[in-house]
Amino acid sequence: MLFRRASRLIAWVAVLGLFAGLGGTAGLPPAADPFAPGEASARGQGQPGVRVTPAATAVIDFADLARRSAGQPQPSVDYEIPHMPYVEPPASGAPAPATYQPAGRATGAVAAVSPPPVLSFLGLEDIPREGASARPFPPDTMGAVGPSQVLTTQNNNYRVHDKATGAILSTTNINVFWQSVLTGAVGVFDPRATYDPYNDRFVMAAAWNSRSPSSSILVAVSQGNTASGTWYLARFDADDTDTDWADFPTLGFNQNWIAVSVNMFPDAGGNTTGSRLWAFDDPTARTGSFNAQRFTGLSV
């Protein structure tokens, strides 16, 4: 995916632009329906979105799911995790690339030192998926910190730690976590996780089934401020025409919205066809409804 890293900027600009168009953190007028035709574009300078509904929704309990799936064999299909190709380093004797120096930043001694960590513990190892023998590459490490728990995600497993002690509370296979909204046993990749302090919730996203007509984006919101508790899950079709698939989801939020942006590629192969973004009304997402609009044709 030569365009994968280069198109990250498009994805993040799309997220920021959407938040500006949807009113930022100022809140919606009480009488407005944020998903009425033209409402999103009317509130900002962005283009109108298309209202979409999830292909599947579910409610799961992380800790209970981890307990029930522990020790149970899971499919060990070593499916592809799309990633940037390895680039050989310069040959010996070749000129080294210039050192990056941000404009206006002085060189020399560091003026301030970050405080040491209060607690240090092992997060999530680069190991096979729970109950399976396949160890995915790359791991795509991600995580989020809440009031009392730490959530760590990789392409293999999801793990929850106690924030105060570092004790492992629950670990589950990434595919098992999303299984209730999937139509296949494997295929989840590129996990994203964050903690929303405005609404006191964990939020996660991922992609499913690369290079496939059934390509989908996945989104989850915790019911409370613990990652080991109950979650609302949803799956959305990435492309109504089933000709493009979604790669490299990026996740953002503000007080009113959750946004997931992806880069689209043809199922048959080839260069990116652009970016798409799903905007979820946060209050309804926290009830499991996941009212959403999809925006296409995004570019810098």
Image (cartoon, rainbow, N blue to C red):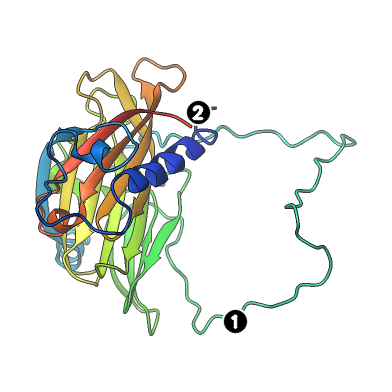
**Mark 2 vs 1, N-terminal side:** 2
From the image, tell me which residue sits under label 2.
Answer: 1
Residue that numbered label 1 is attached to: 116
Q: Position of residue 13 (x, y in %)?
A: 45, 41
Residue depicted at 13% across the width and 39% down the height: 54
Residue at disc 2, secondary structure: loop
Q: Is residue 95 left or right of residue 275?
A: right
Above or below residue 10? Residue 129 is below
User: For numbered disc 1, what is the local secondary structure?
Assistant: loop
- Front-most of residues 78 and 279: 279
Q: Position of residue 296 (x, y in %)?
A: 31, 28
User: Does residue 69 lie above or below 138 as drawn?
Assistant: below
Where in the figure is residue 267, as x and y percent of width and height? 33, 19
Three-letter code for the amino acid on which mark 2 is drawn:
Met
Residue situated in front as seen by the camera: 41 or 124: 41
Location of residue 169 (image quadrant)? bottom left
Residue visible at 34% across and 48% down? 19
Q: Are there few (<14), some (14-19), or many (20+) residues within 10 Å of tag 1? A: few
Q: Quick one: 224 or 160, which is closer to the camera?
A: 224
Between the C-alphas of marks 2 and 1, the distance is 38 Å
- At 23% from the left and 69% from the top, the residue drawn is 228
Q: Looking at the image, can residue 188 be seen?
A: no
Image coordinates of residue 174 in percent, x first then y, are 29, 51
The circle on residue 32 is none
Taking the image as shown, residue 184 lies to the left or right of residue 3, namely: left
Q: Crowding near pointer 2: few (<14 within 10 Å), some, many (20+)?
A: some
Three-letter amino acid code at the position of disc 1: Pro
Note whether residue 140 is visible. yes
